[in-house]
Amino acid sequence: MIEKVIFYVFAAILLLAATLVITARNPVHSALSLVLAFFTSAALWLLVEAEFLGIALVLVYVGAVMVLFLFVVMMLDINVAVLREGFARYLPLGALVGVVMLLEMLLVIGASQVDLPGFAGEAAGSLGEDGGNNIRMLGSVLYTVYVYPFELAAIVLLLAMIAAIMLTHRRRGGTKHQDISAQVRTRKEDRLRMVRMPSERNNDS
Amino acid sequence: MMNFEMPQFALAAPEIWLGVMVCVVLVADLFDRSGEARFAFWLTQLSLLAGVWLAFYTHWGDSGQTTFNGMVVSDSLAALLKAASAALAALTLAYSRDYLRDRGLLKGEFYLLALIATLGMFVMASASSLLVLYIGLELLSLSLYAMVALDRDNRVGSEAAMKYFILGALASGMLLYGMSMIYGATGSLLIGEIMLAASGGENALLLAFGMTFALVGVAFKFGAAPFHMWVPDVYQGAPTAVTAFLGSAPKIAALALFLRLLAEGLGDLQAQWQVMAIILAVGSLAAGNLFALVQTNFKRMLAYSTVSHIGFLFLGLVAGSEEGYSAALFYAISYGIMAAGAFGMIILLSHKGFEAEQIEDLNGLNDRHSGYALVMLLLMFSMTGIPGTVGFYAKWLVLQALVEAGLVWLAVLAVLFAVIGAFYYLRVLKAVYFERVENPQPLVSSRGPRVVVAANGALILLLGLFPDTLIALCRAAFGL
């Protein structure tokens, strides 16, 4: 019962946050809502006892990707004064997101302490005889059963890299760079010109 | 602990070959000093043609052996889908070089992306797991988004790429949502097990929901009405060389997606998806043909005509029989050849600083070069479905399958729309043959593309006169 309540609370917050991501006019608000959405879905994963994936989502997306994203969004507004000025305005929203996250953490931690007959045992049983060690289960199938999709996913990442570089890399004309082999191959005649000049005569001697 | 079973790599040889060649092209392009992506072009063409052979050699005649823990299936259908998509990709890329060079877009990455896209199509063609199917689709879609954005200084092109990217992401989301529900209802990602679970009739409501979302996603990728909004903008905005690629081979991949996911996995739910597919088919026929009537831009007209052809292709799928599927496969292949020819034609008529995009740019083509005019005649006849060209047999097989499935009213409707479609195809021919221009300028083009366009026209005529081999192949792919 209680895990259902928790699930619906998180699902509602997730939907709300996801809606905010696309409706908020302010990109910083959008990014913060996305953080909340990631956090909430991590909590949902924790509920189904996929702890490793939940933590990975928080570490990778919330911890690394979204922080970088926020940086980029804020970089777009180069005017520091405007950013500073906005701090007070963003504070309520930031605080709200923080409080909701804190509540979620408390809920999850609380849920693990509440006795859930059938819930934990059932899910652990479905994970195999190891008794629900997430990382071990993932490790045992990732490179065996799922090796084909895994390798393909690697090619998707390669493709994303190639496409991103192709679309943003620009070779500007007029840049100065060293061509070392040309420098080494150069001969004396290319650089040095002997000029024969009449020597200055000292007429008054 | 589970035991690791060594997968049979030979069954996935075409994918492995393309995957290796992607890396080879990527590195070889770095050492290319010609500035014309010579290595990338020729290596890509070599990989694709070898891929055609390898697909046939590996899969043809196989009866559904699986490898990689059941995630890759090897059968004749996979062979034909792969061979057709690689051959069409090679054909469209053959047009691209001069066009891209004139516009300063000739980069090795273009061919690399096309190769990765073809790898995605290969993966989809023999996918027997939802996960693999989806990753293959993403490989294809992501490379296509980047290819559309190739001319990044062009605002129309960038806008097209943006639209394509956002709508494509939405479609992927729909498809994934549907797949997640199918997984929830059947408890497996493997298509064979989904088929078994679906025939059991459990979780029928959840499965129906999942199927609906999956079908919407597939329709988006096909560009079937009412999910066709991206097609005209993307076709018009993308560089023509990209449009040619986009318009031909990926249709085969979309067909593969439909066949693997809905026809194979959810074949027992046919009664449910048939109604939706009828709506998609009729909607596409109506929207495509009617909007194409009022276009003055040739590329945009061809885009709407694509939508109408997709409608026809869906009619074959609606029939829901092996005959219908083989007719749809034949339709996809022959449409791919026609689309490659039509966009190749635009490439040939364009030159540096000029895009022959408008229909009026075709005025008096016969006076300028009668050979090109003849190919244009063949293309338009084939798209209309006039006997003697491959387009006729494509339509004929679909109609036959429909009548056999007892859907005579749909067949009548399809013929009606085909007649409407004839109007705008013939309008192009009127421009080519009967419009006069003041001082016709002779066309200049290099020899390579000229040979390709002649071969393309000849292919349409040859397959129109002797379609038996290809039809037999398409039927054999479904065990007929």
Image: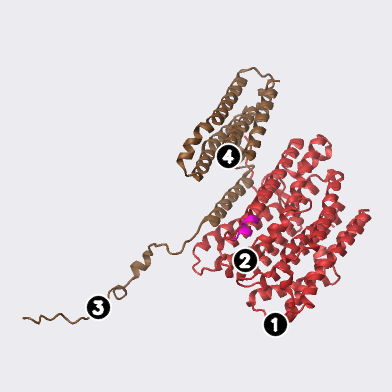
On the image, the x and y values in percent for residue B335 come to 77, 63
- Residue B251 vs residue B22, the one in the foreground: B251
Cα distance in 3D space between marks 1 and 2: 42 Å
Residue A26: mark:
4
Decide which of tag 1 and tag 2 comes sooner along the chain: 2
On the image, the x and y values in percent for residue B275 come to 86, 47
> Which shade of the palette goes to chain A?
brown
> Few, some or many C-alpha atoms within 10 Å of disc 1 (few <14, some 14-19, many ≥20)?
few
Q: Chain of mark 3?
A: A
Which one is in front in this view, the residue at disc 1 or the one at disc 2? Answer: 1
Cα distance in 3D space between marks 2 and 4: 50 Å
According to the image, label 1 marks what residue? B439
Q: Amino acid at mark 4?
A: Asn
Q: Are marks 3 and 2 on the same chain?
A: no
Whether label 3 touches label 1, CB < 8 Å? no
Whether label 1 touches label 2, CB < 8 Å? no
Look at 58% across and 69% down and name the residue there: B101
> What span is colored magenta in the figure?
B154-160
Report the predominant secondary structure element of the magenta stretch: helix
In the rendered view, does A71 fall on the left or right side of A36? Answer: left
Look at 50% across and 31% down and name the residue there: A88
Q: Amino acid at mark 2?
A: Leu
> Which shade of the palette goes to chain B?
red
Q: Are marks 2 and 4 on the same chain?
A: no
Q: Picture quarter containing residue A36? A: top right
According to the image, label 3 marks what residue? A194
Q: Amino acid at mark 1?
A: Asn
On the image, the x and y values in percent for residue B256 come to 75, 53
Cα distance in 3D space between marks 3 and 2: 55 Å
**In the image, residue B377 above or below residue B189:** below
